[in-house]
């Protein structure tokens, strides 16, 4: 990231960041709710797999497989949109 003369991010940096955030939000919205829920709990909220399993009342193995599928789906959606 390039910094402006005053030491903060440039307007271009802010625009890129906002655009990236919108792309990620859009990708999350395209996910099946079960995949989105596990991704949000683990990667956004920072819950451990065991905690996520307890919240969702599913086995920990289910959390692990859903998080892997969710991350792969988000990556694919972003690649298709030219974001990665």
Image: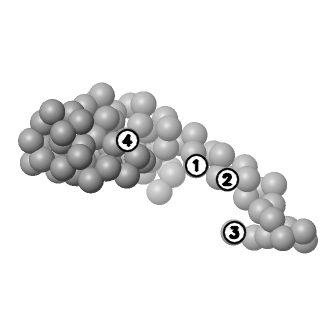
Q: How far apart are the two marked residues, 4 and 1, measured between alpha carbons? A: 17 Å
Q: Earlier in the sequence, mark 2 or mark 4?
A: 2
The residue wearing badge 3 is 1
Residue receiving disc 4? 40
Near-viewer residue (83 or 11)? 11
Q: Which residue is mark 1?
A: 20
Q: Vertical placement of 30 versus 78: above or below?
A: above
Q: How many marks?
A: 4
In this figure, which residue is indicated by the disc labeled 2? 16
Q: Are marks 2 and 1 in contact (CB under 8 Å)?
A: yes
Helix, strand or loop at disc 1? helix
Cα–Cα gap, marks 3 and 2: 10 Å
Q: Quadrant of residue 7?
A: bottom right
* Coordinates of residue 67 in the picture (x, y in percent): 24, 48
The disc, 3 or 1, on the residue closer to the chain's N-terminal end is 3
In-image side of 52 versus 14 (left or right) = left
Q: Residue at x 21, y 33 (%)?
A: 56
Looking at the rendered image, the quarter that the N terminus falls into is bottom right
Q: Residue at x 66, y 46 (%)?
A: 18
Q: Residues within 10 Å of mark 1 (few under 14, many from 20)?
A: some
| Mark closest to the chain's N terminus, 3 or 2 | 3
> Of callouts 3 and 4, which one flags the residue occurring earlier in the amino acid sequence?
3
Q: Secondary structure at mark 4?
A: helix
Disc nearer the start of the sequence (4/1): 1
| Image-based side of 15 in relation to 77, left or right | right
Residue at position x 90%, y 68% from top?
6
Looking at the image, is 7 positioned above or below residue 69?
below
How far apart, in angstroms, are the residues tagged by discs 2 and 4? 22 Å
């Amino acid at each position: 990231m390039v910094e402006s003369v005053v030491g903060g991010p440039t307007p271009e940096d802010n625009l890129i960041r906002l655009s990236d955030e919108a792309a990620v939000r859009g990708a999350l919205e395209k996910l099946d709710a079960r995949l989105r829920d596990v991704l949000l709990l683990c990667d956004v909220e920072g819950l451990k797999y065991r905690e996520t399993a307890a919240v969702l009342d599913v086995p920990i193995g289910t959390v692990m497989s859903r998080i892997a599928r969710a991350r792969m789906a988000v990556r694919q959606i972003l690649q298709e949109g030219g974001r990665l």
